[in-house]
Image: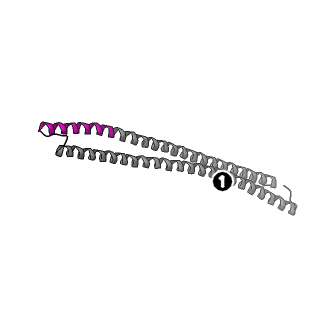
Amino acid sequence: MGFTAFAIAVAGSSILGAYSAVQQGRASAAAGEYNAQMAERNAQVAEQKAELIRRSSEFDIARFRDNFSDLQASAAQAFMYNGFVATGGTPLQVLLENSREADTEIALRRYNASIGEQQALESATEARMQARLDRMVGRSAARAGYYRAAGSLLGGASQIAGMSAMQSNTGATG
């Protein structure tokens, strides 16, 4: 094989290697973007979950209050039916204790809902951070592909230049 044919083969190999490196970088960047989009979607789902926890908790509390009002009314009615006055003494203490327990129950439900809501929002934050990381990794992979491509082209050019210098020194013809 003559010098010219060998130089063409080296140049072709370098160009093919460079093209392959660029395509690999682009594919990695596309995969990173896809992963980032999935992480963003997960973040939105987590935010929706947080909102659902909050709304569901308030709905449950409203239903609890309705049920509690019915219970208190029934208890007061039972006291009066049995001849006790519900506005003083033991009946009043029972109704007041029931109210305190209901307030504690409502506060506990709100507290548990806020913990669930905060966990969901933290999950959303983590997903968004993962999306940013995936995009950074994708961009880095794309840059690395371009650097590998440049290295392939420079390596081929160096090899051709070295062969050309050798040919010039030996005086051979291609």
Which part of the image, by quadrant, shows the N terminus?
bottom right
Residue type at mark 1 is Ala
Front one among 23 and 135: 135
Q: Position of residue 104 (x, y in %)?
A: 30, 48
**Residue at horizontal 63%, vertical 47%?**
26
Front one among 31 and 85: 85
Q: Give the left or right position of residue 79, taking residue 32 as reference.
A: left
Q: Position of residue 4 (x, y in %)?
A: 81, 52
Q: Position of residue 17 (x, y in %)?
A: 69, 52
**Residue at horizontal 27%, vertical 46%?**
100
Q: Give the left or right position of residue 45, taking residue 21 as reference.
A: left
- What element does badge 1 sit on? helix
Question: How dense is the environment of label 1, judged by Cα within 10 Å: few (below 14), some, or many (20 and up)?
Answer: some
Bounds of the magenta segment: 61-82
Front one among 56 and 35: 56
Front one among 100 and 143: 100
Which residue is denoted by mark 1 in the rendering? Answer: 144
Q: How would you classify the magenta stretch by its main secondary structure?
A: helix
Image quadrant where residue 51 sits: top left
Q: Position of residue 24 (x, y in %)?
A: 63, 49
**Residue at the extreme left:** 82
Magenta-drawn stretch contains 121: no
**Residue at horizontal 67%, vertical 49%?**
22
**Residue at the extreme bottom:** 169
Picture mark count: 1
Asked if residue 171 is positioned above or below residue 60 in the image, the reply reads below
Q: Give the left or right position of residue 19, taking residue 93 as reference.
A: right
Which part of the image, by quadrant, shows the C terminus?
bottom right
The colour style of the image is one colour
Magenta-drawn stretch contains 68: yes
